[in-house]
Amino acid sequence: MENNAHKIDYNEKAISIKGLYKSFGELHVLKGIDLEVHKGENVVVLGKSGTGKSVLIKILVGLLKPDAGVVQVLGKEVDKLNQKELDALRLHIGFAFQSSALYDSMDVRQNLEFPLLMNFKNLSKAEVKDSVEEVLDAVGLIDKLNQMPSDLSGGQRKRIGIARTLILKPKIMLYDEPTSGLDPITSFEINELINEVQEKYNTSSIIITHDLTCAKETCDRVAMLLDGTFVKTGTFEEVFEDQDERIQSFYNYNFIK
């Protein structure tokens, strides 16, 4: 099932990237890339490991500064923000880590409560409880409320990680290799969850992956990142109908049915 684009607002840009360059010494990682993500849109950034996908994410959240170019997130030019402004922007950006990044010493409830209590000091116990139960229900794990992360499967930990991100009701979701290390059935469930999150919360998302199945199932558009540039952007079919040898090689190496 490919993702439906019926809630995308093409008049509003959640993310706008123009002429973005980033190098580390003699290593030129991003070489003048352009990308727009509209409100309510899932854009998959697809590419091999080491092609700059994670560097792009770090620039979007202000962890790295670009060498050149303009990066706007929710209308704010990220590298021009002071720390207070950057912290405020990050509250609207959810980051689903590849590793799930749960605290092993906390149970599921405490893991989900933590970002709320850190960022919103005036919430009542009832408000916190309702928020926790809402996001757990959204990821289908309400019965795991009192479990420890060590008692969860890899797929369940991914879901809880996404729930912890959703609890702050972000406008933008950034997924870093969401299906990495998962079996095909669990990967399918995570792909479905990404689409359900888009549908329920009307998020704008960038999904970083090299998994073609994940890309096909979750994308409204694919941006193919090779050799530091987006060599093709479009629907999944438009990208892989391109006869560019680099794109065909990537497809054949990551063959999907």
Image: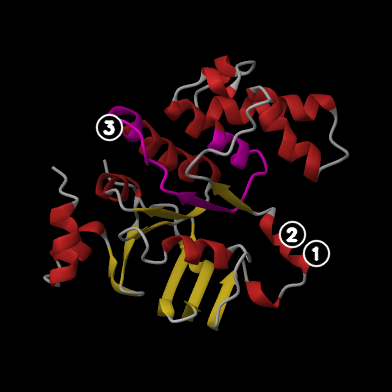
**Label of residue 84 in the image:** 1
Identify which residue, 238 or 190, lies in the foreground: 190
User: Among all residues in the image, which is located at the extreme right?
Assistant: 122
The residue at 13%/42% (across/down) is 257
168 falls in the magenta region: yes
**How far is disc 1 from disc 3 in space, using C-alphas?**
42 Å
Residue numbers of the magenta segment: 161-187
**Label of residue 123 in the image:** none
Please state which amino acid type lies under the numbered disc 3: Pro
Residue at image mark 2: 87
Please state which amino acid type lies under the numbered disc 2: Asp
Q: Is residue 10 visible?
A: no
**How far is disc 2 from disc 1 in space, using C-alphas?**
5 Å
Q: Give the SS element for disc 3.
A: helix
Q: Is residue 196 visible?
A: yes
Can you say whether 4 is above or below 157 in the image?
Answer: below
Please state which amino acid type lies under the numbered disc 1: Lys
The residue at 48%/54% (across/down) is 205
Q: Give the SS element for disc 1.
A: helix
Residue at image mark 3: 184
